[in-house]
Amino acid sequence: MFCFQCEQTAGGKGCTKVGVCGKSPEVANKQDKLTCALVGLGRAATKNTPSKLADELMMLGLFATITNVNFDKLRINELINLIQDEKNKLDSSAKDFPVSDLWTGNEDIVSLRSTLLLGLRGMAAYAWHAYVLDKKDDEVTAWFYKGMRAIGEEHTAEEWLNLLMEFGQINLKCMGLLDEANTTAFGHPVPTKVSTLVEKGPFIVVTGHDLHDLKQLLEQTEGKGINIYTHSEMLPAHAYPELKKYAHLKGNFGTAWQNQQKEFDSIPAPILYTTNCLMPPKSSYADRIFTTAVVGYPELKHIPDANSKKDSSSILEKAMELFGIGSKENKMAQKDFTPIINKALELGGWKEDKQFTGINGGTELMTGFARNAVLGVADKVIDAVKAGAIKHFFLVGGCDGARPGRNYYTEFVKNTPKDTVILTLACGKYRFNDLNIGDIGGIPRILDMGQCNDAYSAIQVAVALAGAFKCGVNDLPLTLVLSWYEQKAVCILLTLLALGIKNIYIGPTLPAFLSGNVLNILVEKFNLKPISTPEDDIKAIFSR
Ligand code: FSO
Ligand code: SF4
């Protein structure tokens, strides 16, 4: 096996024996085969128009290879078989990409090619979340095929760089599509206080990013005496009007994904994984885990899609059930959560209310400062900047992770001057989102904009501020301090670079898939900077 796609890769170079994430060599090799089959599907799509199922397989096949999503070689195999079928229907002469060529060749070319592939994986997750809410964009869909074809082609370094920038723009479109899907289905997020108290009685913890799954679970648990708690990237769900209206969506349990083995160990409740980040479960709680959609792990219980299963092919029938793909009509995935509801009732929850805290001891988390809420008070923000009450904005966001060094982000936030505002998003915020660092004229100093895909909101706010101040985004008093872990962070970074955003700080370590030369190009062109210490970085930011 070879895999260097995430921040925790072995030795900062690549996992070759077994994944630090727990991925086995068999699964890693199958995922490579899946990736190369998707190149074949991309090639076949030049001959005939891909079907709805082909589009679904393109998104889901890429999504399934993201870190901590699917550890089940049988499911990956099913996807490969379905992809081969669809490819043959489009063009039986189209060849897959040789697996042996996927991670080999000239170091810089491998680096650039891998960066595009990993970005495509991240974008596939966003496209899928939009798709289950019935939103699709032809340009985004077409780019998956184009991008995967490119993975199987020879390109010069300059051509790869151009492809990466083009991809960054497409991913912006895709994140915009998901923003539209979420806000159309659930309304615009409103600032909301979220408690970390877990009330006595039966409850279910929901993790991952899929708001459509959460909505269905809320509907099906209403009036049943079961409370629902968000975990990790689900926290922003509390801010959406169509989700927060459910009184039994009570609060948030736990922190970011890397603490799940400790946090889930002894809770008297089941946990629903709608997406990453799934860690190999300990035996103490494996029987309480339920996966759904693209998430998979051998032996864990899976909530299938309840949509029609009436196709003649049995692999397809199975895929329809497991992943929610392949139905003839445009149907949003429908799940029957009875097994998890029964488990919650059986386990019964705690006998007494339990007060939990964030990692800094705070008991309340604020969320819901997405673009609509922030731009709604834009005048106030602009006036505060003009009056000198707000001196600088930081976007401190991205993924959390298990490796040491990530308390940089906590310390960074603690060290920011009192006249600065911190925008944040994704699961990295758990390092500091329970801190009370005050407000500026009623504007909280920490503004949680949402999940990782809500980087779209942050971009909209930055562009609007630049418009108001009649300057470019790079001229704003704004610094991006990003933490990365998996491939969604890669597609977001490419979008930021494609928008020409400079001076981004990135950590806790640099991606193993960026070769020295590629990194040099990014440093020269965009002044991308690795993080150092919070004190030195803050000093450098203010001396610019
Ligand atoms: Fe975190 Fe995991 Fe949202 Fe990622 S839960 S690490 S960037 O999947 O997607 O922020
Ligand atoms: Fe290693 Fe990360 Fe790949 Fe897992 S996803 S095998 S930890 S590089």
Image (tube, rainbow, N blue to C red):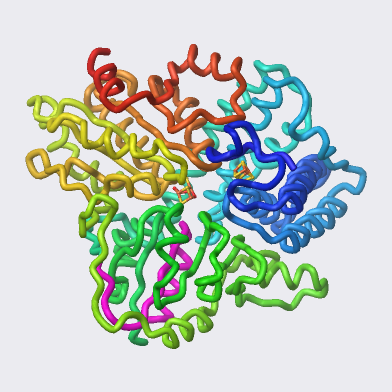
Q: Is residue 272 visible?
A: yes
Q: Is residue 49 visible?
A: no
Name the residue located 23 percent from the left edge and 27 percent from the top edge: 468
Quadrant location, the C terminus: top left
Residue 212 included in the magenta stretch of the image: yes
Residue 246, horizontal then vertical, whole percent: 30, 74
Q: Nearer the viewer, residue 184 or 528?
A: 528
Which quarter of the picture shows residue 316?
bottom right
On the picture, is 512 further left or further right than 285? Answer: right
User: Splitting the image into four quadrants, where does ligand 2 fall?
Assistant: top right
Count of numbered labels shown in the rendering: 0
Q: Is residue 471 above or below residue 95?
A: above
Report the residue that reaches farthest toward the right: 93
Name the residue located 68 percent from the left edge and 36 percent from the top edge: 147
Residue 85, horizontal then vertical, whole percent: 84, 57
On the picture, is 487 further left or further right than 348? Answer: right
Q: Is residue 176 above or below residue 274?
A: above
Q: Is residue 67 above or below residue 514?
A: below
On the picture, is 181 further left or further right than 322? Answer: left
Name the residue located 79 percent from the left edge and 47 percent from the top edge: 33
Q: Nearer the viewer, residue 260 or 295?
A: 260
Residue 176, horizontal then vertical, whole percent: 45, 44
Residue 338, horizontal then vertical, whole percent: 51, 83
Residue 46 included in the magenta stretch of the image: no
Q: Magenta stretch?
A: 197-221
Name the residue located 9 percent from the left edge and 44 percent from the top edge: 442
Which quarter of the picture shows residue 535?
top left
Quadrant location, the N terminus: top right
